[in-house]
Image (cartoon, rainbow, N blue to C red):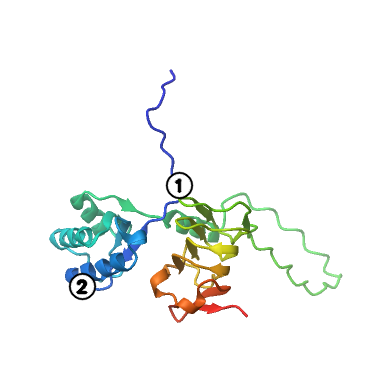
Amino acid sequence: MDFELAGELKIGQVGIANLRIRTLDVAKLTEEMRGRVQRAPKLFARAAVVIDFGGLTRTPDEATARALIDGLRDAGVLPVALAYGTTEIERLSEALGLPLLAKFRASYERDEQAAAPAPGIREPEPAPPPKAAKQAPPAAAAPVAANVAPGMIQSAPVRSGQQIYAENRDLTVLTTVGAGAEVISDGSVHIYGPLRGRALAGAKGNEQARIFCREFHAELVAIAGHYKVMEEIPKELRGKAVQVWLEDQQLKIAALD
């Protein structure tokens, strides 16, 4: 029997900020977030935030976690979930009434499965050559081609409100990334027109990824979670051709020669 659905549910890539707690100081965390919202209200005001307690040695109690959630809301952002972690985190999420968000958990599982030998029937080994015959030295094994997906090419302009995501590959944008638009890649991002929106490279943690842009007016750039907003970018770089990279856990931006 067919039913007409009142709502269609799809699971897709979403841009949600991840707040990794390093020091459980509710007042300090609240003020830091308030400062981010004040510096870049278009990006952070009422932004969805996942709280990640994975950097702490102990999971906070429910009262402390609720105080943090209230503080972050007062600062101007909206905590929507906890990051997946231990069983204690799972219990805390249930107590708080928040979901667990495991954005990269599936990719970790795929990587682990790929590393393990696949079960199956073993092929019979070839019979050894006659003893009288002199065996030649074994040939060097041919290099195995890496399973690398070709880069994604976006030829149309990326307009305000759009999000383009290149999973497990580089992203090349041939035209403009408009204000309010977002381009995301697990590899590097190459933009051959003006970048007025947001560009995020190394989305799954690749710290070797880079961003290259011909005309730089970005609202935000990020590599492997390290980011800078427009207010933190030197004015002399605006409108220039630049590259963005990570060095010693610091985001660097420099003009291209």
Q: Please give the label number shown on residue 12.
A: 1
Question: Disc 1 marks which amino acid?
Answer: Gly
User: Which of 140 and 221 lies nearest the eye of the viewer?
Assistant: 221
Q: Position of residue 114 (x, y in %)?
A: 54, 58
**Reading the chain from its start, which is encountered first: label 1 or label 2?**
1
Q: Amino acid at mark 2?
A: Lys
- The residue most toward the top is 1
Asked if disc 1 and disc 2 are in contact, CB closer than 8 Å, the reply is no
Answer with the quarter of the image where residue 81 lies: bottom left
Dot label at residue 28: 2
Please say whether residue 83 is visible from this viewpoint: no
Q: Specify the label residue 121 is tagged with.
A: none
> Where residue 183 appears, x then y in whole percent?
51, 58
**Which quadrant holds the C terminus?**
bottom right
Q: As rendered, which of 121 and 87 lies closer to the eye?
A: 87
Residue 117: % across, % down: 56, 58
Q: Residues within 10 Å of mark 1 (few under 14, many from 20)?
A: few
Tell me if residue 123 can be seen.
yes
Spatial separation of the CA atoms under disc 1 and disc 2: 33 Å
| 174 sits left or right of 31 in the view | right
> What crowding class fits label 2: few (fewer than 14 Cα within 10 Å), some (14-19), or many (20 or more)?
few
Image position of 92 with respect to 187: above or below: above
Q: Which residue corresponds to the image point at 29% horizontal and 55% vertical from the top-left?
A: 46
In the rendered image, the residue lying farthest to the left is 63
227 in relation to 77, above or below? below
Q: Secondary structure at mark 2?
A: helix
* Residue appearing at x 75%, y 58% in the figure: 126
